[in-house]
């Protein structure tokens, strides 16, 4: 009897201990970096197909702004942009799959918002791309400000935050508009292209992509005004600070590189520079890389393999891409935009 | 007999002309300046270099011109977080500069007197050229401070977006005329350069 009760107690204690360890492991898993290094590959959750951001070609080679960011993280860790595996995720499953550790990082045009961080126990380290709702209209209308859109007939997708933002913006500015709403985005595009409305609203990055498919793309302009906040950011799990730091500083290294004029083409020259800010970034001075758990040349690797922020932007969504989205908000803070990285020092 | 001699001389002269023409062509280090060439109006600018209103956050006052050499863009600040952006051609490597100047003079269809240092580098250039469509300064010129540099038009619209000039900033004629009508003498011009490594 005694031994039975004893055994029961021991068993119970073991069960409680195991449960405690399991819960701690679930909530305080701080081993993403270790796992990634052991595996030799970064697992990236991406959009299954969004031109300019992440899209595979017919041979399965991925390209895009979000894809390049993952390659930058892989370059910092492994000195190899190919050490990144892309796992397409649906909008509905993306945060769950990150929590379940199917991926190490989400780089999937996800808007940073407070409830997403608190409800899903996730963390958005830094804004990679400032998106927001904009307006497309025929160039022939000769309008260059959203404040001149009073009385417009506006096509919008129904039941979206886009529709709500539109209403807020017009009310706040005391302007009237006629709403033409459709349940599907393709229907909105069709309606606009056939002239059922004289203005089309959606997120600016989307407008540039959708314009390519209009019957006469060059006849339409997209206003520089952005009326809502859609900060797109990579996402990681909370309480895994080593990993979060690497993701965050990968982005900041790319932005700082652009500000300092360091590109994938002049990186070898930069390694010989005697300018202190350049030396700290490329690792010829200080131990910033080691302090991240990486090597001295972590940032030089990113710049060499993937490029600075501006190079990645122009190649995927900017002037050198089909989309041709002007830098706008995503220009450096020192050149007319709001992209700003804390210094490496 | 005189006829044949005539013919021979003509052939020799023609050959000489061809040779000198090809020679002077070979001497041109770049395609930036082709005095006399009429602008090709069919040249369509890359969307990036077409005149357009863009988002631009700055503490500079509306009416200020900001030139970004690395981007090949000229911004005319409008206030309210926006700027009118034009595509430009800039100085080739070694001929780029930065600083703060004012527009000191404006001229329509300006004459061109290439400065001595430019003649020394490109001896084939004319010493003087009257204003007109074949003039490399194009339809308008805005003189920058006391420098030899100008914001001007061009007879080579295909060079917008490139670095070929001797330090001037060129726009297509339609754009330079548009800018000319928007800015008075005294306008502040900020020229920004890519940072040095």
Image (spheres, rainbow, N blue to C red):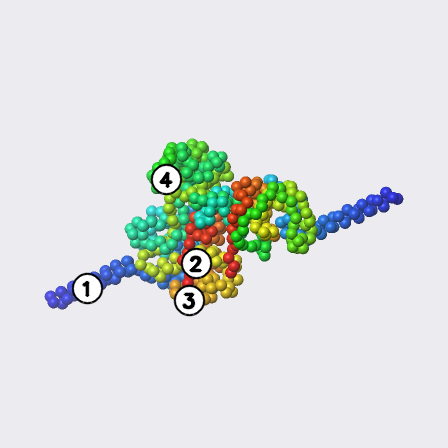
Q: What is the distance, in whole Å, between disc 3 and disc 4 at their CAs?
A: 48 Å
Name above or below for residue A295 compared with residue B132.
below
Q: Earlier in the sequence, mark 3 or mark 2?
A: 2
Q: Which mark is residue A169?
A: 4
Q: Residue at x 46, y 49 (%)?
A: B60
Q: Which mark is residue A253?
A: 2
Q: Is residue A317 visible?
A: no
Q: What is the distance, in whole Å, between disc 4 and disc 2 at their CAs?
A: 36 Å
A238 sits left or right of B53 in the view: left
Q: Residue at x 60, y 43 (%)?
A: B107
Q: What is the distance, in whole Å, between disc 4 and disc 1 at their CAs?
A: 60 Å
Tell which tag, 3 or 4, sits nearer the viewer: 4
Q: Is residue A134 visible?
A: yes
Q: Earlier in the sequence, mark 1 or mark 2?
A: 1
Q: Earlier in the sequence, mark 3 or mark 4?
A: 4
- At numbered mark 1, what does the secondary structure look like: helix, strand or loop? helix
Tag 3 residue: A287
Q: Residue A22's x, y, as percent?
A: 26, 60
Tag 1 residue: A13
């Amino acid at each position: 009897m005694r031994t039975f009760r004893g055994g029961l107690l021991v068993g119970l204690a073991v069960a409680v201990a195991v449960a405690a360890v399991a819960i701690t492991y679930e909530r305080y898993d701080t081993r993403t970096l270790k796992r990634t290094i052991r595996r030799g590959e970064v697992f990236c959750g991406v959009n299954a197909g969004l031109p300019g951001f992440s899209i595979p070609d017919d041979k399965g080679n991925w390209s895009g702004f979000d894809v390049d960011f993952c390659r930058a993280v892989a370059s910092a860790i492994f000195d190899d942009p190919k050490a990144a595996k892309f796992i397409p995720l649906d909008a509905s499953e993306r945060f769950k799959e990150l929590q379940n550790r199917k991926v190490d990082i989400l780089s999937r045009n996800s808007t940073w918002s407070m409830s997403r961080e608190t409800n899903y126990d996730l963390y958005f380290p830094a804004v990679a791309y400032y998106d927001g709702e904009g307006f497309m209209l025929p160039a022939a209308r000769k309008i260059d400000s959203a404040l001149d859109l009073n009385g417009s007939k506006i096509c919008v997708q129904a039941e979206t935050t886009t529709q709500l933002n539109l209403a807020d913006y017009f009310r706040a500015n005391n302007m009237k508009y006629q709403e033409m709403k459709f349940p599907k985005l393709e229907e909105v595009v069709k309606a606009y292209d056939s002239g059922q409305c004289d203005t089309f609203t959606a997120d600016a990055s989307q407008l540039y992509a959708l314009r390519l498919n209009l019957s006469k793309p060059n006849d339409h302009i997209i206003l520089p005004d952005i009326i809502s906040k859609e900060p797109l950011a990579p996402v990681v799990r909370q309480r895994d600070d080593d990993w979060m730091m690497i993701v965050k500083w990968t982005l900041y290294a790319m932005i700082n590189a652009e500000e300092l004029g360091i590109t994938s083409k002049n990186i070898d020259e930069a390694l010989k520079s005697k300018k202190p800010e350049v030396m700290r970034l490329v690792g010829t001075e200080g131990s910033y890389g080691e302090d991240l758990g990486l090597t001295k040349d972590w940032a030089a690797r990113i710049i060499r393999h993937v490029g600075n922020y501006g190079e990645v932007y122009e190649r995927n969504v900017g002037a050198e891409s089909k989309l041709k989205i002007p830098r706008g908000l995503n220009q450096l803070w020192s050149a007319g935009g709001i992209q700003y990285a804390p210094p490496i020092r | 007999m005189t006829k044949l001699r005539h013919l021979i001389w003509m052939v020799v002269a023609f050959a000489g002309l061809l040779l000198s023409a090809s020679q002077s062509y070979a001497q041109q280090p770049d395609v930036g300046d082709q005095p006399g060439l009429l602008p090709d109006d069919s040249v369509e600018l890359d969307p990036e270099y077409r005149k357009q209103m863009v988002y631009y956050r700055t503490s500079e006052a509306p009416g200020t011109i900001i030139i970004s050499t690395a981007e090949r863009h000229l911004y005319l600040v409008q206030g309210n977080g926006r700027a009118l952006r034009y595509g430009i051609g800039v100085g080739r490597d070694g001929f780029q500069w930065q600083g703060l100047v004012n527009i000191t003079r404006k001229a329509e269809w300006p004459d061109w007197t290439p400065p001595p240092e430019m003649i020394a580098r490109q001896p084939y250039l004319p010493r003087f050229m009257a204003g007109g469509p074949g003039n490399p300064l194009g339809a308008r010129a805005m003189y920058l401070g006391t420098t030899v540099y100008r914001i001007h038009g061009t007879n080579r619209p295909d060079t917008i977006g490139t670095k070929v000039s001797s330090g001037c900033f060129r726009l297509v004629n339609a754009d330079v005329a548009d800018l000319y009508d928007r800015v008075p003498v005294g306008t502040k011009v900020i020229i920004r350069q890519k940072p040095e490594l």
